[in-house]
Image (spheres, grey):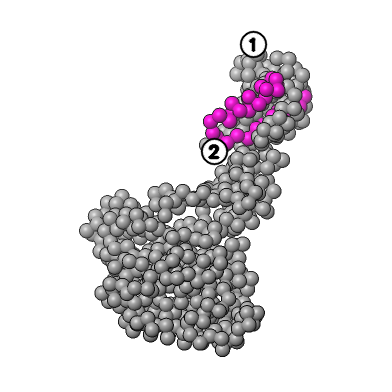
Amino acid sequence: MIIQQLSVFLENKSGRLTQVLEVLGRENIRITALSVADTSEFGILRLLVTEPDKAKQVLKNNDFTVNITEVISVSAPNEAKHYAKVLKILSDRNISVEYTYAFTVDDKSIIILRCSNNHEAINELKSHEMDLLTSGDLYKL
Amino acid sequence: MEIWNRHFESMDRDGIRKVQGERLRETVERVYFNVPFYRNRMQEAGLGPESVHNIDDIRKLPFTTKQDLRDNYPFGLFAVPMSEIVRIHASSGTTGKQTVVGYTRADISTWSEVMARTLTAAGATRNDFIQIAYGYGLFTGGLGLHYGGEKIGASVIPISGGNTTRQIQLMHDFGSTVLACTPSYALFLAEAIQDSGIRREELKLKVGVFGAEPWTENMRREIEQKLKIKAIDIYGLSEVIGPGVASECLVQNGLHVNEDHFYPEIIDPETLDVLPAGSVGELVFTTITKEGLPLIRYRTRDLTRLHYEKCDCGRTLVRMDKCLGRSDDMLIIRGVNLFPSQVESVLLEMHEIKPHYLLIVDRQNNLDTLELKVEVEDEFFQDRISELETLRQRIQNSVESSIGIGLKVTLAEPKTIERSEGKAKRVIDNRKF
């Protein structure tokens, strides 16, 4: 249920995001989801890709600061109340969400979460019969 | 134009050389018998106290460097028992260790004398109000000016650095006529005065004595126009005594070196040969009256030129040009000395970053700014903004507390900071001197 996510450190200068995507594109790596968090000086690019280990290596070879981080993913109907429900299950158990992003496939929201304790979060969501996704599920989207 | 000590400041060349020769002889004798470091150096060179007869014999003596002061930290080069030392000052060193200087009662008196000359040369008298906006404390700027101001009998306002609003208010209310601070702070103050709504006619300021950092003729013109004062350049370094080593007169044609106390030479920093008068080279000082910490042929690393022609002001003291640069990598930021190696030693203790860094110095609104770029180490890269921000802040705090200069830390991507086989480029200085 743990999903390997690629995190790339980027200075805020134009063209850097393009370079990341070009490097991955040359290796035919597919991107399922992408999100950018930024401050005025730097940004962190978060990617869900096919073959995360390979993607990490090719980015490293191209002098990017990159790491693999663990996230979890939930599929829910794409209405705000369902997203809210997921978050409430976690907050009721004092599991904090460090960041989250989501994208839509058909009438479903695919929610990505990094929690203070991912394993505890998985158990909690499972016990509430939430639809947790594996990396295999994601790459098939 | 007034001269504080007409006897020494206007002495003819033969006379001053005779004085310098006698004083050098006494100094060499004192250091030989009281400072093991100098005795060993002289013995290694086959020299004894009898080797020095006149001022030209100074060329036989070995040089002293900042490294020697560091190796003998804190008091190893003092030439008197500590019971004779009445004051200790210190300035930043290259590896976190301070450069420590000690003064006897006579040294404080010498310092007051040369500062009295400095202030008199700038046109100050007992009727002036001197606002001292140099920092007080271990830094020699504040107290150096202070003792000189009292010596000439002026009314000294020891306001110290910072607090611009209060600086302007007291300048206005007390009627300060002389301002002493770094040239960049003078410019900053000039603009703050314009913004304060106080009209220039309400201020009595007539002259400024500015030093402790390099500045250009353009900056001088700007200060003079904005503050409507005469801007006088002063030069000194704590190792030699502090401010008061050399200073301009109102003719503003070079800085008169108080060479009856501090004997200057210009050398080639590579060959260490003494260069003929008028050549640009590294300035070297021998203190010939100091008791606490006498220095023999101390390499300042400042690059300049000496002029021996008499000045229109009547002084015959040799004049040095405004410093033209450094023969090492020391930076002066807001009046504080900084060696890139100081930053490096802090960074080497932190595992989260690579030992590559770049210091970017600039000047914004007339104040120096310092930015430090460091590369994040892969293994420590976390994908949470808050952690990176914490890391950035931690680097900033460690470096600031070590170098004593506020700065901004920026995290950079790997390999974006230039590597080089030889001397790495660690500094980009965008200030225009």
> Residue B249's spot in the image, x, y percent?
32, 70
Q: Residues within 10 Å of mark 1 (few under 14, many from 20)?
A: few
Q: Secondary structure at mark 1?
A: loop
Q: Is residue B188 above or below residue B254?
A: above
> Residue B397's spot in the image, x, y percent?
58, 52
Left or right of B225 on screen, residue B54: right
Name the chain letter of the residue that bears numbered label 2: A
Q: Is residue A3 above or below residue B88?
A: above
> Residue A38's spot in the image, x, y percent?
57, 33
Please tell me the numbered disc located at residue A41.
Answer: 2
Q: Is residue B296 above or below residue B330?
A: below
Q: Residue at x 31, y 66 (%)?
A: B252
- Residue type for callout 2: Glu
Mark 2 and mark 1 in contact? Answer it, CB < 8 Å. Answer: no
Residue beneath disc 1: A107
Identify the residue at the far top of this view.
A106
Left or right of A51 on screen, residue B353: left
Q: Residue at x 70, y 33 (%)?
A: A61
Magenta residue check for A133: no
Name the chain letter of the residue that bears numbered label 1: A
Which of label 2 and label 1 is nearer to you?
2
* Front residue of B68 and B19: B19
Magenta residue check for A11: yes
Q: Which residues are magenta?
A: A1-30
Residues at marks 2 and 1, CA–CA distance in whole angstroms: 37 Å
